[in-house]
Image: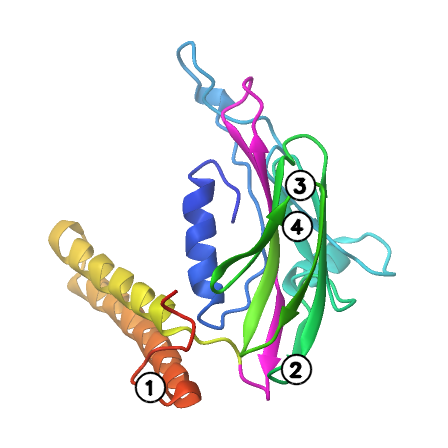
Amino acid sequence: DVISPFDHEGAVFLYHRLLSCGLRLAATAGTDVFLSFAHGPDVASNPPGWGRVYAGLGDRPLSVTAFQDAIRAGRTLATNGPWLTLDVAGHGPGTVLDRAVGDRLTVRARAAGAGAERLALVGPDGELAGGAGGLAVEVTVDGPLWIAAVARGEGDPRVLDHTSLAHTTPVYVDVAGRRVARARDARWCLDLLDRLEGFTAEHGRFAHAHQHRDLVAVLDEARAYYRGVLAASSASTGSPGDSRRSDR
């Protein structure tokens, strides 16, 4: 979930790291409502449905299956207020394009509604363009990348969220079938896994020793993936593990 009862910007930061390691993850949201055990004068929860996900069904009628399929395909917008659209070379969120280095892509985004005060187009190297209302830019492909739209603004003071946020699933741009693989982001994920293992070894409480071994096995499987991202980055650039633009 990009939007949840917790730290939206922290979730966005993590989401971008994972996308830059070649993972194709739909932007989703979950409110989680805690009104039933609120105590004290302060707001303890957002209203039901405050953080939500919209999914493009295409020409299919609304049904649980159609909605599930649209989320799996990444045709989604996660938001707690603003409405946001993204178009990359005529294609919407979740689309995978295969392009050559040097190709140019026309990218358009539009944000509207409460809390849509600043609009940005983002990718593996950060912000590609920013403004308000609408954006239309040309992006030159210089390697595999992803492009998403984000809107931010002031939140509603009556609820727990103090900022508004909307985030699309990206459009993914492969080059010769290669996904984006950024060394910097893979290293960040590997460091996070190491710290998580250390934390569980020091503070974890397990009923049986094999439960911790099972956890470490899952972490090792994840490490193998991100080491593969490092290898892919090295192979595509000819350098020892650094993508051409990863350290900007």
**Residue matched to label 4:** 77
Q: Quadrant of residue 137?
A: bottom right
Give the residue at mark 3.
Answer: 132
The answer to whether 221 is drawn above or below residue 55 in the figure is below
Q: Mark 4 or mark 2, which has the lower sequence index?
A: 4
Q: Choose between 52 and 141: the one closer to the eye.
A: 141
Report the front residue among 21 and 182: 182
Question: Which of the two discs, 1 and 3, labels the residue nearer the N terminus?
Answer: 3
Contact (CB < 8 A) between labels 1 and 4?
A: no
Magenta highlight on residue 177? yes
Closer to the eye: label 3 or 4: 3
Q: CA distance from mark 2 to mark 1?
A: 23 Å
Identified by mark 4, the residue type is Leu
Comes first in the chain, label 3 or label 4: 4
Question: Which residue bears the numbered disc 2?
Answer: 99
Name the residue rendered at 28%, 60% in the picture.
Answer: 192
Judging from the image, what secondary structure is the residue with disc 3 in?
loop
Per the image, the residue denoted by label 1 is 239
The residues bearing labels 4 and 2 have C-alpha atoms spaced at a distance of: 24 Å
Q: Please state which amino acid type lies under the numbered disc 2.
A: Arg
The residue lying at 42 percent from left, 39 percent from top is 7
Q: Which residues make up the magenta segment?
A: 150-178
Residue 86 x %, y %: 71, 56
